[in-house]
Amino acid sequence: MSVLARLEATIAARKGADPDSSWTAKLLAKGPEKCAEKFGEEAVEAIIEAVKGDRAKLTSEAADVLYHLLVMLAARDVALAEVLAELERREGISGISEKASR
């Protein structure tokens, strides 16, 4: 099991937890919109670090982005496996062709 799959399982386990006992539970309790907002904030922070060129900070922010992406997906009951299946579907297809097919 990959670290992302383990993280997804942890997030799923926190879904019903007391929001006072878990940051993840607190975030999920605020609803999908708040989860999406937090994901966006973390993505912007990652962009800033990418522009600055600080590898260590970018790595840290990228980890935050992945965590918050998984929380946002969980808030909408989208499994990581669904996202990975979509990536597999696109594998080997030109980005230009794939985008044109949407």
Image: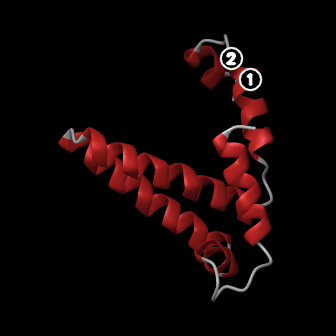
The residue nearer to you, when weighing 60 against 35, is: 60
Seen at 71% across and 62% down, the residue is 11
The numbered dot on residue 6 is none
Q: Is residue 49 left or right of residue 10?
A: left
- The alpha-carbon separation of the residues under discs 1 and 2 comes to 5 Å
Residue 82 in the figure: left or right of residue 28 = right
- Judging by the rendered image, the residue that carries numbered circle 1 is 88
The spot of residue 8 in percent (x, y) is 72, 53
Residue farthest left in this picture: 52
Height in image: 50 above or below 13? above
Q: Residue at x 69, y 81 (%)?
A: 29
Question: Which residue does the image show at 67% across and 10% down from the upper left?
Answer: 92
Quadrant of residue 82 within the rendered picture: top right
x and y, in percent, of residue 10 in the image: 72, 60
* Three-letter amino acid code of the residue under disc 1: Glu
Q: Is residue 71 left or right of residue 61?
A: right
Give residue 84's quadrant in the image: top right
Q: Is residue 34 above or below residue 39?
A: below
Quarter occupied by the N terminus: top right
Q: Dot 2 lies on which element?
A: loop
| Residue 60, horizontal then vertical, whole percent | 38, 50
Residue at mark 2: 91
Q: Residues within 10 Å of mark 1 (few under 14, many from 20)?
A: few
Question: Where in the figure is residue 48, as x and y percent of width and height?
Answer: 27, 50
Tell me what residue is drawn at x 65 percent, y 44 percent.
4
Callout 2, which amino acid? Glu
Colour logic: secondary structure
The crowd level at tag 2 (other Cα within 10 Å; few <14, some 14-19, many 20+) is few
Q: Secondary structure at mark 1?
A: helix
Query: Which quarter of the image is occupied by the C terminus?
Result: top right
What residue occupies the far bottom of the structure in this picture? Answer: 20
Q: Tell me whether circle 1 and circle 2 mark residues in contact (CB < 8 Å).
A: yes
